[in-house]
Amino acid sequence: MTPRQRLRNAGQLCLHCLRNIAYYRASQAAIPLRGESQFWRTAENNFLDIAVLEWCKLFADQSAKHHWRKVVTDQDKFLSELLVKLSITEDIFNSHVKEMRTYRDKFIAHLDEQNVMQIPQLDIAINSCQFLYQWILRKESQNDTFYDAPADAEAFYNDHLSQGKEAYALRRLRH
């Protein structure tokens, strides 16, 4: 895989994660329908699961092909600025990584013997994906790597959150 392909793939993973969190959050904001079909429940859970899987590829597995350390040139500066942007310490970020990995490992990849699923807190995931996406667009991109990509990750997230809310509102009208 060329460095350009790795950057594009990492950018796509950021966008996939953000889109799926937006749709999941839209589902959580929607008023549940009485007797709702299994389809909608499954879709909502899939949004969360895919978001966690994509985020883990970028932030939780250092050996993964698209981990941020493999696409960011100045890793120390990136981590420092990421933590400032998130207003957290490295220990808190590492705790979030552990939380996301636990959800992925215990409830997505395997169904272990835990009886209670702890859905990860998603604000850090959103903000870290937005930060990574903007970083690679502005500081890592070469030779027009992202010529066709959205320019702003936060706007991308907000647009998909709005689309998701609209879809859930239409579902309610049709029910």
Image (cartoon, grey):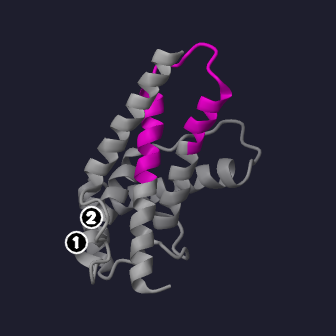
State the image coordinates of residue 104 (x, y, percent, origin top left): 61, 53
Q: Which residues are magenta?
A: 17-46
Residue shown at the point (49%, 23%) measured from the top left: 171
- Mark 2 lies on a secondary structure that is helix
Left or right: 38, with 88 as reference point:
right
Quadrant where the C terminus sits is top right
Look at the picture and state if 156 lies above or below 140: above
- Mark 1 lies on a secondary structure that is helix
Kindly report the distance in space between the C-alpha atoms of the residues bearing marks 1 and 2. 6 Å
Look at the picture and state if 145 lies above or below 169: below
The answer to whether the residue labelled 1 contacts the one labelled 2, judged by CB atoms less than 8 Å apart, is yes
Amino acid type, callout 1: Arg
State the image coordinates of residue 8 (x, y, percent, origin top left): 40, 72
Residue shown at the point (26%, 49%) measured from the top left: 155
Q: Residue 64 appears in which quarter of the rendering?
A: bottom right
State the image coordinates of residue 23 (x, y, percent, origin top left): 45, 39
Left or right: 144, with 160 as reference point:
left
Which residue position is annotated with label 2?
134
Disc 2 packing (10 Å; few <14; some 14–19; many ≥20): some
Which residue position is annotated with label 1?
138
Q: Is residue 99 visible?
A: no
Amino acid type, callout 2: Gln
> Magenta stretch: residue 48 in it?
no
